[in-house]
Image: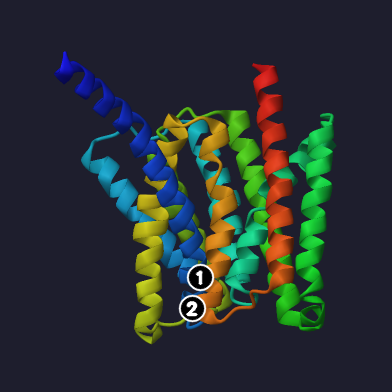
Amino acid sequence: MRTKIKNAVSSRATAIGLPILALCWVSFFWGTTWIASKEGVKHMPALQLVAIRQFLGGFLYISFFLYKKAPWPKGKQWKTIIILSILSFVLSNGLSTWGVKYISSGLGAIIGALVPLWIVIITFFRGERLSRLSVIGLIISFSGVCVIFYDHLSDFLIPSFRFGIIISLISTLTWAFGTLYTKKKAATFNPYFSLGLQMFLSSIILFAYNGATGTSVSLSAIPAISWWSIAYLVVVGSILTFIAFIYALQNLPAEISTIYSYINPIVAIILGALIFGETLNAVIALGGSVTLFGLYMVNYSLRKTQKSKI
């Protein structure tokens, strides 16, 4: 009897503990990828870094599934994969990485967390009504962003800073469209294999862009610190954390599994201040907290709306 109880408690702890551990991993390590990107793009073109990262990550994913003899996508599945590779990896990941070349990693992470706001705005223009909670969340988040940008008003006189902000905002918009497109098409193919194919295809597009524009540098000219950044982004950011993310998503309630999106910016801001000496003051702390609270309200409203449709 004692053995049965012990086994039951142990299995229950494992069922809860492993997904929570995966969520903790995602919450922290996706925050650190902003730091790795910031360090990497200091020494090489940002889009070349993204191309190499996604080529290596995609190659590893595809190699694994070829070894497992997994079936390849068919017909219209390829269309979905190609569109998502452009929206989520060429544009979103590419532009967000390019953006942190000109703005702080913490600011880039906060902008990156704004995806739910775009989703609400896009669905509104598609004719869906906004709940009162969504509207309040939008207003609160916008107020928080205004507080953060107030501390950077003088920086807007710098063209490179404005450019970094603009492309970072565009990256969140394309990720929002990619998220909505995924929901519309629904998952009809292995999500991990699809992820690898999206990464690999996006790397080909980015390599072609770098070659056509002459913005790439020779591999021998890339310093060791950038290669270490790429290795970290591939192993930790593109593989281990994505696996942990999908595992947490499959085994935890939605309201818990989305907690990572509020912790990532905090991790990026703190590490950016400690490693790069980026600004961390009361204004940024207050604005970041207000923005994340507004995002929580928007996310909560979206989940509530989805449940009511089921």
Q: Nearer the viewer, residue 115 or 203?
A: 115
Examine the image and state in which quarter residue 264 appears. bottom right
Name the amino acid, label 2.
Ile
Q: Residue furthest front?
A: 2
Task: Name the residue rendered at 53%, 48% in the picture.
Answer: 260
In this rendering, position of residue 175 left or right of residue 55: right
Image position, residue 84 (x, y; %): 56, 45
Snapshot colouring: rainbow
Quadrant the N terminus occupies: top left
Residue at 77% in and 74% down: 151
Instruction: State the separation of the CA atoms marked 1 and 2.
Output: 6 Å
**In the depicted view, which residue is nearer to us: 51 or 40?**
40
User: Label 1 amino acid?
Assistant: Leu
Q: What residue lies at 68% left-to-right and 74% top-to-bottom?
A: 281
Viewer-closest of 7 and 161: 7
As drawn, 274 above or below 305: below
In this rendering, the answer to whether 188 lies above or below 244 is: above
Q: Which quarter of the image is occupied by the C terminus?
A: top right
Res 90 visible: no
Q: Are marks 1 and 2 in contact (CB under 8 Å)?
A: yes
Query: 72 or 109, which lies in front?
Result: 109
Q: Which mark is residue 275?
A: 2
Q: Quadrant of residue 297?
A: top right
| Residue bearing the label numbered 1 | 271
Q: Answer above or below: position of 305 versus 292.
A: above
Mark 1: which secondary structure?
A: helix
User: Is residue 144 shown left or right of residue 186?
Assistant: right
| Residue 163 picture quarter | bottom right
x and y percent of residue 147 in the render? 80, 65
Q: Residues within 10 Å of mark 1 (few under 14, many from 20)?
A: some
Regarding mark 2 in the picture, which secondary structure is present there? helix
